[in-house]
Amino acid sequence: MSFNNDKAISKDRLRFTKNKLSADLILLAIAANALYFVSIYSSDVGSYYYRLFIGGSIVYNLVFMLVAFLSSEGIKNYKLSYACTSVLLGIMQICRIFYLPMKAHKASNPVAEAKQSVVMASGQFTYVTVCLLVSAAMLICAGVIGVLKTTTLNGYLAELEKQGQEGTDDE
Amino acid sequence: MSDLKLQHLEKIYDNKVQAVYDFDLDVRDGELIVLVGPSGCGKSTTLRMVAGLEDISKGKLLIDGKDVTQMPPKDRDIAMVFQNYALYSHMTIYENMAFSLMLRKENKNEIHQKVLAAAEILDLTAQLNKKPAQLSGGQRQRVAMGRAIVRKPKVFLFDEPLSNLDAKLRSATRREILLLHKKLNATMLYVTHDQTEALTLADRIVCMSMGHVQQIGTPLELYDDPANLFVAGFIGLPPMNLFDVEIRDGQAVCDDFAVDLSDEERNRLAAYEGKTVTMGVRPENVEERGRITVDVSTNENLGLNTLVSGRIGSHKVTCKFRGWCNYKAGDAISVSFGRKHFFDKETTNAIRG
């Protein structure tokens, strides 16, 4: 097979290489999310919000990690649906900033022994917000890269198929 | 591609065991050299010395005139294909072939073109997205070759690459290696214990035994004019029939038969009058009519030929007759010997004119 330029070669390369960049970005996003929840659950937030939604938060984290991991595997093999899922997960990570961290930030700590402290100090708030933002950025980047690469590959494969059919017709 | 000079190479292990003695060979640019010999003869050790996987105890190794004796394997610009393929099972065929180039941090687009070109040569394009486990033995071996080709090395080394394949696949892959050599015109060093591979592939064969080079020559030279008893017995299938005979009055005489010598043979053996020498006759040089009686023990029809084994008195003999024969055990057939080879009894070297 001969190629006219580097762009054509890059397109053709997609046929034989996996989308490792997107897959790795998603795995890093999972790691950033892990840093977020380790910080959250090791602080007093747990005791302050020891109600139904802290349980929900734990369940969400588990579901998030599972879906993100599946997206990582799917996006590696140029599956468009998983690329879209990755973008969606990224948006959800941004939304999460306005949920637990924002509520807990500067809220008075109800625990008797920690009367003059807040549930989430500014330092921890900044840390968990950055974790969620980094995680979101990685997921969105992975998704966008996934969408671009997948559409490029699908277009290229369709082009090849068309060329193949034309070749067969000529014969 | 490049020429390769192995100058008086020797391999002595730390426990003082010497595996290779004075190996001296000039491999010309684009030549396919086959090292052949029985297990433990030092052929793989020699190859590993060339690859840099074994230290060279004595001698020099030159590639393109450059002394690489002390150079580490990665800097020698040599590619080796192993018997067990040595493929990465978790990588696709494409990734396996591209891996060495990726390690060199070559441009990804260039790597892609090299891999596609190699895959096309080896008819592997349709397999590039598969994992090694999904391929047959022959295809895996082709991948191993592809991995060597993409690097465009100065010298290709093959260490018994067909040993893991079944007979049919071996023969097909052998032909592919031959075609590959013709296409690439590459300098290749190929190790095998299979004389059929050696005879069919080689431009020149190096026959080895016990660490010593026994003979270097073209396949025809080794078959037609073996330098000594070892080469005579090793090259050729079935092996040459050997008889101890006394040279007496223009005849080669033993307890069970006597054969007349031609004028040329008499001249050649003039110095051996009254002495015992070893006479060799290839099974295909035993002719189906004559004065010598063979008591048949087995008859094996191979289609085009028939192998008949039996005894001439106390001597075992194998004959290869053309066509389909139906001898039975116990039959007596008359034969004569065509082309004969003679070897000195003491030195085991061929007696030449």
Image (spheres, coloured by chain):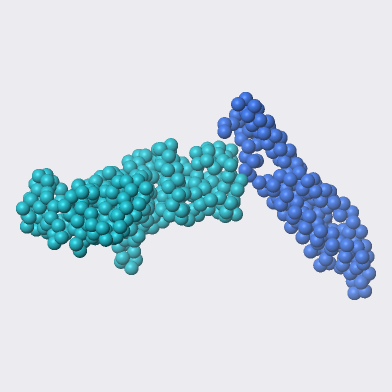
Chain colours: A blue, B cyan
Q: Where residue B214 appears, x then y in whole percent?
A: 25, 53
> Residue B197 or A108: which is nearer the viewer?
B197
The relative height of residue A122 versus residue B77 in the rendered view (above or below) is below
Residue positioned 13% across, 59% down in the render = B254
The C terminus of chain A, quarter of image: top right
The N terminus of chain A, quarter of image: top right
Taking B95 as reference, is B4 left or right? left
> Residue B309 or B115: which is nearer the viewer?
B309
Q: Where residue B286 appears, x then y in whole percent?
A: 23, 50
Q: Where residue A169 appears, x then y in whole percent?
A: 64, 27
Q: Residue furthest bottom?
A: A113
Q: Where residue A151 appears, x then y in whole percent?
A: 73, 38
Residue positioned 75% across, 49% down in the render = A138
Q: Is residue B215 visible?
A: no
Instruction: Count the labels in the image.
Output: 0
The relative height of residue A13 versus residue A57 in the rendered view (above or below) is above
Q: Is residue A164 visible?
A: yes
Taking B105 as reference, is A108 left or right? right
Residue positioned 12% across, 57% down in the render = B253
Taking A91 as reference, is A138 left or right? left
> Residue B218 or A29: which is nearer the viewer?
B218
Taking A122 as reference, is B250 left or right? left
Residue positioned 23% across, 49% down in the render = B288
> Residue B60 or B186: which is nearer the viewer?
B186
Q: Quadrant of residue B349?
A: bottom left
Q: Quadrant of residue B22?
A: bottom left
